[in-house]
Amino acid sequence: MISRLHQNYKTYPRQFWLIADAELIVYGATEPDATVTIGGRPIKLNPDGTFRFQMSFKDGLLDYPIMAVAADGEQTRSIHMQFSRETPSRNTNTKEEAVLEWVG
C-alpha cells in the first residue's frame, strides 16, 4: 500500500541559488579641518569631522592603518586595525548561474 505522502509526492524542476557576502564599515571622528587617511588613502570628512569608509570584506586579512593629521601638520593621531575573515564552507551560485535541478 502506498502512503498518502508518496501519492502526492511529485518530482519537479527548480533553479535554486544563494549569494551572501560581507562588508566592513570603519567610522570615526576628528577635528573637521584635519586630514584622515585609511591605508594611505585620503578619506573625506563630514563638516562635523565624522567619517565613514565602507568596503568589501573578502576572505583574508585586511590591514588598515588610520591616521589623522591636524590642519597645521603639527599633531597626528593614529590607530592600526586588522580584520580577518574566513569562509570555511561555500556552496553558492548566482541567479544567472543557477541550473535546472530535479527535486523530489
Image (spheres, grey):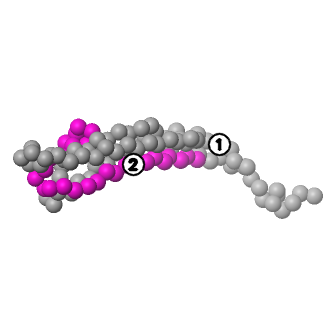
Q: Quadrant of residue 57?
A: top left
| Amino acid at dot 2 | Glu
Residue range of the region highlighted in magenta in the rendering: 16-43
**Farthest left residue?**
72
Residue holding disc 2 = 23
Left or right, residue 18 beside residue 66: right
- Compare residues 23 and 95 and report the one nearer the observer: 23
Residue 88 seen in the current view = yes
Q: SS of the residue at dot 1?
A: strand
- Compare residues 9 and 31 and report the one nearer the observer: 31
Residue holding disc 1 = 101
Which residue is pictured at 23% across the width and 54% down the height?
A: 51
Left or right, residue 91 beside residue 51: right
Residue 24 percent across, percent down from the top left = 37, 49
- The correct choice, above or below, for 95 with respect to 49 in the image is above
Q: Quadrant of residue 81?
A: top left
Left or right, residue 2 beside residue 71: right
